[in-house]
Image (tube, grey):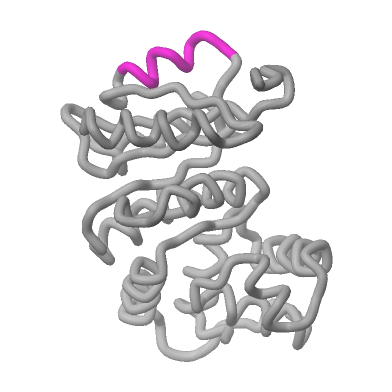
Amino acid sequence: MKKETSSALRIWAVEDNTAYRQALAFIFKKAEGLELETFSNAEDALAALRNPPAPDAILLDVQLPGMDGISAIAHFKAAAPAVCIVMLTVFEDPDKVFRALCAGASGYLLKTLPAERIVEAIREAVAGGAPMSPGVARAVLGRFVELAAPGRSSDYALSDREREVLELMTQGLIKKEIADRLGLSFHTVNAHLRNIYTKLHVGTRGAAVAKALKEKLV
């Protein structure tokens, strides 16, 4: 059955490996409500942004010919501030994960993940989540801990429940997992996340986790 273009999420994949790019195209062709367009480099994708509509999310390879993926994040965000960017990589490099999240990436995934998880991660990112492979989450947690300043500068008036949610975020749990762990509804977790972002004066999950660890809020 042909997908309804009007309601489908527009996803771009910027990936220079032809075989993996074709694999992504095959995966997303079977996914309901998602439409995928692929590019082999960041420059071509940035040029395509001049012709709206912009995509809802971008799967962005870290290692690209010409402009690398991490450098491209700021350019994509400048051209399309609302776009969700999920990085794809082969290696768990804590420094690159940290740089990507600080630049505005919403998630960071290993290419070895099952196809279903890639699709789920894109839906999660568009819904406001921050998908990460478990190994990546551990790596970035370690990186943030290394950079953490001693002492707690402020508690930002976080409630006990908000602090619980924030702590689980730093462990790499996604919203559904947080809801299951705390016995809350998905919508309640969403509400707590909005409050956390407001109180911490951040706009992304990555920034919230970075601040929580740097200032020892959890």
Q: Looking at the image, is 191 positioned above or below residue 153?
A: above
Furthest residue in direction bottom, as rendered = 151
Q: Residue at x 78, y 82 (%)?
A: 183
Q: Looking at the image, is 5 positioned above or below residue 114?
A: above
Q: Residue 97 location, x and y as percent?
A: 33, 59
Quadrant into which the N terminus falls:
top right
Q: Residue at x 50, y 24 (%)?
A: 79
**Which is more toward the observer, 143 or 189?**
189
50 inside magenta stretch = yes
Q: Residue 132 location, x and y as percent?
A: 45, 61
Quarter of the image for residue 201 reads bottom right
Q: Residue at x 38, y 21 (%)?
A: 45
Total count of labels: 0
Q: Which residues are magenta?
A: 44-52
159 inside magenta stretch = no
- Is 18 left or right of 125, judged from the image as shown? left
Furthest residue in direction left, as rendered = 65
Quadrant into which the C terminus falls:
bottom right
Q: Residue 177 location, x and y as percent?
A: 63, 72
Asked whether residue 60 appears in the rendered view, the answer is yes
Q: Looking at the image, is 51 positioned above or below residue 157?
A: above
